[in-house]
Image: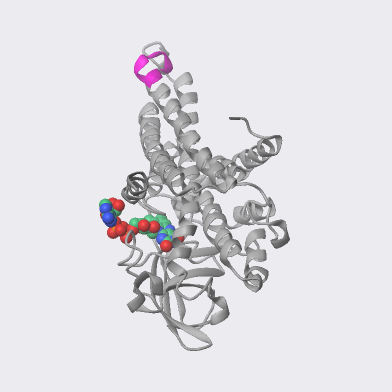
Amino acid sequence: MDFSLTEEQKLIQRAARDFAQNELLPGVIERDEKQLFPKEEVRKMGELGFLGMMVNPKYGGSGLDTLSYVLVMEELSKVDASSSVIVSVNNSLVCWGLETFGTESQKEKYLKKLATGEIIGTFCLSEPEAGSDATSQKTTATDKGDHYLLNGTKNWITNGSSADVHLVIAQTDKDKKYRGINALIVEKGSEGFEIGPKENKLGIRGSDTHSLIFNDVKVPKENRIGKDGFGFKFAMKTLAGGRIGIASQALGIATGAYELALKYAQERKAFGTEISNHQAIAFKLADMHTQIQAARHLVYKSAWDKDMGNNYDLSGAMAKLYASQVAMETTIEAVQIHGGNGFVKDYHVERLMRDAKITQIYEGTSEIQKIVISRSILN
Ligand SMILES: Cc1cc2nc3c(=O)[nH]c(=O)nc-3n(C[C@H](O)[C@H](O)[C@H](O)COP(=O)(O)OP(=O)(O)OC[C@H]3O[C@@H](n4cnc5c(N)ncnc54)[C@H](O)[C@@H]3O)c2cc1C
């Protein structure tokens, strides 16, 4: 068993850390306040190869392992979880889904641009009445011979107004239930495709979350991913890897808050000494450090499972469940350690606390992770 990182992984980690400090940190408070999408920062992340990290270089990707991707997610999320979710969706859901299940022509046409960051994508599964219960798809993709006619609304779509390519899950044959669901590639600007207003969110406010509305949108048959009826399996398989990305986002948020709290506790004085000398504060730091390290082991193990070709459904779900819980608890304590300063924006920890919450909700809530985990251990 080897817990050390390779030289290449350390270099990538360093590049992401430098980028987060130099490029993400300066505008992060303003982007959060004004709900500004980090357009320029995303362009630069594309140039660094962060948007197609695991994609084969022949499709424009960086050809790296999942652990390298996790390290980048962790570093970016320490500073700006709004930017890291864009990286996560593009890598884990869109690029991975297309590279693993797409046709050669889909990869040529879409994956190459997505992997370099020339464009970004979305993953559209959730609907007003289909969140955790993803089988209840109301969006329909009616088979019209050489094309599908897409109708319905997708909710909460990350990158909603900034993306050019959308992977949309829709029901073709209702009688076949989840076996009658398809995944289609839909281009921005298709006739009948509308983008709803931006959601005004608690956290990750820099990422743009929208409803997407489809009214008789014509989607060519060659834009279906996999065989007829493969859509639900596509969504579940893709989300299994997505969980590793969100788990690493949660790990990064927790680590970012912990590092700020550690520094603050060694500087701030109360009752004639640094507050880290009060055992109540020192013990909080001890708990944070221990829990973060435990979360890190779970997250890295799930990435390792994926790289080794092992099944990562269970390890990914455990990593997401635990890391998101640690992110929530750590950020709350980081605010507490900062006292009144924790309650204002300049100190960053209140934003990290707000950002942490989403990691317990998207790509499968904590309750859904427990269903995945319990089914896995009981079967
Ligand atoms: C900021 C943001 C970005 C998002 N980005 C995307 C995106 O890019 N693409 C996309 O497709 N979706 C996206 N989502 C949607 C997200 O994945 C869903 O919100 C999530 O899956 C939960 O679904 P829901 O909101 O419908 O909640 P519900 O499914 O209605 O759940 C409500 C509550 O009931 C619990 N619950 C439900 N079923 C069970 C059960 N069987 N047992 C126990 N408890 C249960 C849930 O855990 C939750 O606590 C995003 C959401 C947000 C807020």
Residue in front for this viewpoint, 69 or 20: 69
Residue in front for this viewpoint, 369 or 28: 369
Say which residue appears at 53% left-offset and 87% top-offset: 146
Horizontally, residue 362 falls left or right of residue 19, namely: left
Q: Which residue, as the protein is rendered here, is positioned at the far top?
A: 272
Residue 157: in sight, yes or no?
no
Tell me where the magenta segment starts and ends, as one range.
Answer: 276-283
Q: Is residue 277 magenta?
A: yes
- Majority SS type along the magenta span: helix
Q: Is residue 310 magenta?
A: no
Q: Position of residue 287 (x, y in %)?
A: 39, 25
Residue 91: in sight, yes or no?
yes
Residue in front for this viewpoint, 105 or 168: 105
Label count reads 0
Residue in front for this viewpoint, 275 or 95: 95
Q: Position of residue 374 (x, y in %)?
A: 32, 45
Say which residue appears at 33% left-offset and 78% top-offset: 175
Q: Which residue, as the protein is rendered here, is positioned at the far right?
A: 58
Horizontally, residue 357 falls left or right of residue 245, namely: left
